[in-house]
């Protein structure tokens, strides 16, 4: 079944014509070209040769063609299997394999080979590890700094189960931006992020900012929230002085994942950006195809 034909709930908000029924195909503003081109092919070959993973592929990102064609990608460390089972995420869940101790240097060499001015790193959750994977995280940041000192570094980290020692390891490695995604509004955590806690994620972001590092988070819309809940979440982010906030449309990876409950019109995304920045968030990147690392180089 083509992904554009995946059946979803038909919930139209009669009070807001921007909230469209999701029955049938995606609206035009969510359609993208299939990835391809010489730079894309070269990058894919390099990733496979070094056995590296990207969240672009694992999470079925709609911007992969654009970003890879421009020679940028988001590296995913600590394997391709997550210990959590979020209902929105395409990354596989299960028992992860052994840690690859060469991975930090392999990522750093790839960043150097690609000539990246800005590198984005993320990871699966490794809740089974005593250090939550934070040692590999720190080693990866430091390896990039060693081989490509002019490259700015953004990391999109898990919550480390709220372990401050693990978080501090990443902070002490001094990336330029530390991002941790809230993903959705508090009411939906039990369904969407059952092993996460809203306040715990908020506390992670608050601590990052308190350590003098640029903080960033993102959410998806269209998974069951309403606009008032989005604005309430924004206020929580203003209260912790968040620097960068991204908002994008949730797209159902497979029929086994949470269904799309609304396709949010681009004009509503523009309104999210306007209101968020008026409320006091320094930079809001908001649009149907926006993802955590989309245009990340602009946020440094």
Image: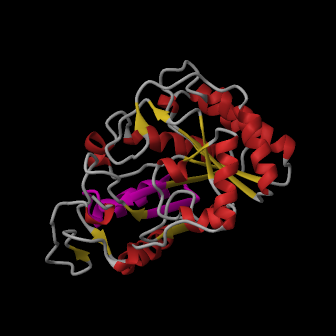
Which percent across, then down, holds residue 227? 29, 66
* Mark count: 0
Q: In which quarter of the image is the C terminus?
A: bottom right
Q: In which quarter of the image is residue 165?
A: top right
State the residue in front, 205 or 138: 138
Coloring applied to the structure: secondary structure
State the residue in front, 159 or 58: 58
Residue found at x 15% / y 66%: 10
Residue found at x 47% / y 33%: 81
Which percent across, then down, holds residue 164? 57, 29
- Reply yes or no: does residue 240 show up in magenta: yes
Q: In this view, does 152 lie to the left or right of 170?
A: right
Which percent across, then down, holds residue 261? 23, 61
User: Eyeballing the image, is 159 above or below 236?
Assistant: above
- Reply yes or no: does residue 193 show up in magenta: no
Residue found at x 54% / y 20%: 129
State the residue in front, 192 or 204: 192
Residue range of the region highlighted in magenta in the rendering: 218-247
Residue 14 visible in image: yes
Residue 70 visible in image: no
Q: In which quarter of the image is the N terminus?
A: bottom left
User: Eyeballing the image, is 267 above or below 122?
Assistant: below
């Amino acid at each position: 079944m083509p992904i554009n034909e995946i059946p979803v709930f038909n919930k139209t908000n009669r009070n807001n014509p921007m909230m469209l029924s999701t029955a049938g195909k995606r609206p035009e503003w969510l359609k993208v070209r299939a990835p391809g081109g010489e730079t894309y092919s070269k990058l894919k070959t390099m990733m496979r040769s070094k056995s590296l993973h990207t969240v672009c592929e694992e999470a079925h990102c709609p911007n992969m063609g654009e970003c890879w064609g421009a020679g940028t990608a988001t590296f995913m460390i600590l394997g391709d299997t997550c210990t959590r089972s979020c209902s929105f995420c395409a990354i596989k869940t299960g028992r992860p394999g052994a840690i690859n101790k060469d991975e930090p240097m392999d990522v750093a060499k790839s960043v150097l080979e690609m000539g990246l001015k800005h590198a984005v790193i993320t990871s699966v959750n490794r809740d089974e590890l005593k250090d939550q994977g934070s040692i590999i995280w720190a080693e990866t940041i430091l390896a990039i700094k060693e081989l490509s000192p002019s490259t700015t570094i953004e990391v999109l980290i898990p919550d480390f189960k709220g372990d401050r020692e693990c978080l501090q390891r990443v902070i002490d490695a001094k990336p330029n931006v530390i991002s941790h995604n809230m993903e959705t509004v508090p009411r939906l955590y039990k369904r969407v992020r059952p092993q996460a806690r809203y306040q715990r994620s908020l506390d992670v972001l608050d601590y990052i900012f308190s350590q003098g590092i640029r903080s960033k988070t993102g959410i998806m819309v269209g998974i069951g929230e309403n606009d008032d809940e989005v604005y309430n979440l924004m206020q929580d982010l203003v209260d912790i002085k968040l620097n960068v906030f991204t908002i994008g449309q949730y797209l159902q990876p497979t029929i086994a994942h949470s269904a799309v409950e609304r396709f949010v019109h681009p004009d509503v995304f523009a309104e999210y950006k306007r209101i968020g920045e008026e409320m006091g968030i320094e930079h809001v990147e908001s649009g149907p195809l926006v993802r955590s690392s989309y245009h990340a180089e602009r946020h440094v």
